[in-house]
Image (spheres, helix red, strand yellow):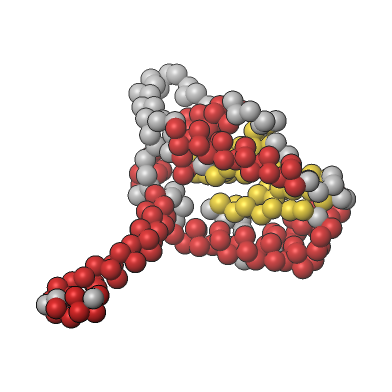
Amino acid sequence: MTRRFLSSLPLASLAVALLAGSLAGCAPLLIAGAASTALMASDRRSSGAQIDDEAIELRAAARLSEAMGDRVHISVTSYNRQVLLTGEAPTEALRERAEQIVGRVDNVRMVVNEIGIASPTTLPQRSGDVLITGKVRASYVDASDLQANAVKVVTERGVVYLMGRVTQREAERATSIARQINGVQKVVRVFEIVTPEDLRQAGMPAPTREAVAPAPQPAAVAPAAQPEPAGAVTSPVR
């Protein structure tokens, strides 16, 4: 019955049906590819920096594993070629050695060493950290005045580390939101502070609801000191 029915269809109709089925099968791949492209385009890093960050994380993790094996538990997170090291090492010597190893990886411009001198965390602890990270990210998505993908979130032992290229207002807002999440012990900011103008000149997504810059002050009045110079990579702020 089925064969007879198919053979009675005009060739043009059959071709259309087959093409539609083929496209339907490819739809998930097309959607996934489009989503990946959209995320890369909305990232505040250049495409080259995004690729370098991926390579840095892979190379650094491989070198740490080769040099130290299971004596340490270290996570490597790179953002705009700035590397954050979190986790645990049993001795200060191994902690410092990990920083030296990662610092020699190609394209690394700075290493922020937040490795604790302690035993490796347990599986339940790491699961709790993953849950906290998810809650923080979800809260950023819900915030109408913050671009969620402008901030990278890393959690270790209940301590939330925030990375990204953000304005001073965004840094304060992201920190405030993270501090309100249950289970967060402390928030450490490892941001690269930029101005809205810096982002616009670089062709990056502009901040949401960024405060308007104040009018220039009279010459007789000294300008107020800025909390962070534009483009500066901050030391960890707790």
The residue at the point 45 percent across, 19 percent down is 221
Q: Split into 4 quadrants, where in the image is the N terminus?
A: bottom left
In front: 165, or 134?
134
The answer to whether residue 96 of the structure is visible from this angle is no
Q: Position of residue 27 (x, y in %)?
A: 33, 62
Could you tell whether 153 is left or right of 206 in the image? right
Q: Position of residue 216 (x, y in %)?
A: 37, 25
The answer to whether residue 103 of the structure is visible from this angle is yes
Could you tell whether 202 is left or right of 174 in the image? left
Residue 62 against residue 142 in the figure, above or below: below
The residue at the point 70 percent across, 66 percent down is 62
Q: Split into 4 quadrants, where in the image is the C terminus?
A: top right
The residue at the point 63 percent across, 28 percent down is 182
The residue at the point 74 percent across, 43 percent down is 124
In front: 220, or 128?
128
Could you tell whether 44 is left or right of 175 in the image? left
Q: How many marks?
A: 0
In front: 70, or 122?
122
Residue 122 against residue 56 in the figure, above or below: above
Quarter-wise, where is residue 206 in the image? Answer: top left
Q: Position of residue 235 (x, y in %)?
A: 65, 40
